[in-house]
Amino acid sequence: MHDPLPASPALLPAGFDDKLPPAAEAEARSVATLLEVFATHGYQRVEPPMAEFADTLLSGSGQAVAEQCFRVLDPESRRMLALRADITPQIARIATTRLAAMPRPLRLSYAGPCLRVAATPMAAERQVDQVGIELIGPDSPRADAEMVALAAEALAAIGLTRVSFDLTMPRLVPALLDDAALPGPARAQVERALDRKDVAQVRAHAGAMAPVLEALLLSAGRPARALAALAAAALPPKAAALAARLAETVAAINARSPGLTLTVDPVEERGFPYHTGACVAVFAPGRHEELGRGGRYLCGGEAATGLTLYADAVLRAASAPPRRTRIFLPLEAPPDLAQALRDAGHATVQGLEATADPGGEAARLGCDAWLGPTGPVFLSQPET
């Protein structure tokens, strides 16, 4: 029996990748741009730790992602730690403890990696870089609209101007099925059918609620069509209140950001279990992965809404930002000229040994130019 071949040092677990040049810099610059847009709207940056005590991180809204969290034993405290799978529960903890005395509305932004035990149908990565905002305090359609408006503005700042925002109300279908009092097996069949958009199975298992659910299922798409179907449906009081709030949220988004591409799916239950109201998923044309997701939830006892962008997915959908021009500096290059190049936004690569062929050394180091006596000498004609 042969000994197994040693694993390559470059081999990583499934779902984990090294970010190499120039992709790592492109992501860092894009994340910085997103955060800068959020900052201009008054969102203050917080940075929670990667690990917390498990009984803290996985309480409240954190219960929704408990199965996706890695756990390790802390040798210092001898208590179990959990590595975050989502940053939103950490923001809720910070808002209700360390920032409990700050005036509301409380606007916070964040960025950082999250680790997940398993990949999901929508994402193969198990390390997901999140960039997001949370608005804590107000419970209003205007607050929901602010999440969508700022996400659109931030994405446009990195070149993603053609995105769609898919609005849902995850608690609507449960409210309808609660009112219908369907037996457990029938309810499970209906929920499965709605998830698969299977009209025939909805008719077969939804009983008296079938006509309403079928109408809502077929109305998904442009907001006017979906909201008209909701207005025409005979909804019980709780579901009617959720439908009215969804319509108010659409109106608030259109008032703040006319021209955004919106869709509404009244029966989609996509979202985390902690979501209590309108939710949104962000997509780009021609791509099937979510660029981001958010929605309304409870932050302790406070109303809150937020939206998280997934940096890897956003970068795959966006054009890479322009790469910095790399300029090789021969050993004798004047420091003031080198600084002027950096001030102009270029990257300089300092030579550490004398060379008789600065152009060849620049090419070897992957530079675009070298600094000659009168300025940069490009190895090829720069793009204009």
Image (cartoon, rainbow, N blue to C red):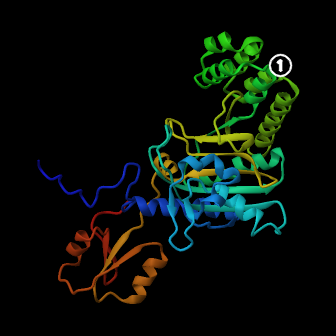
Q: Which residue is mark 1?
A: 232
Q: Residue at x 58, y 41 (%)?
A: 162
Residue 41 in view here: no
Q: Nearer the viewer, residue 265 or 200?
A: 200
Residue 325: x %, y % from top left: 39, 68
Residue 276 in view here: yes
Quarter of the image for residue 265 reads: top right
Quarter of the image for residue 8 reads: bottom left
The image shows residue 38, relative to residue 160, as above or below, that is below
Residue 260: x %, y % from top left: 68, 40
Tag 1's secondary structure?
helix
Q: Nearer the viewer, residue 60 or 19?
A: 60
Residue 182: x %, y % from top left: 74, 19
Q: Residue at x 66, y 67 (%)?
A: 45
Q: Which three-letter amino acid code belongs to the residue tagged 1? A: Ala
Is 237 displayed left or right of 330 in the figure?
right
Residue 18: x %, y % from top left: 37, 59
Q: Quick one: label 1, few (<14), some, or many (20+) residues within 10 Å?
A: few
Q: Nearer the viewer, residue 188 or 213?
A: 188
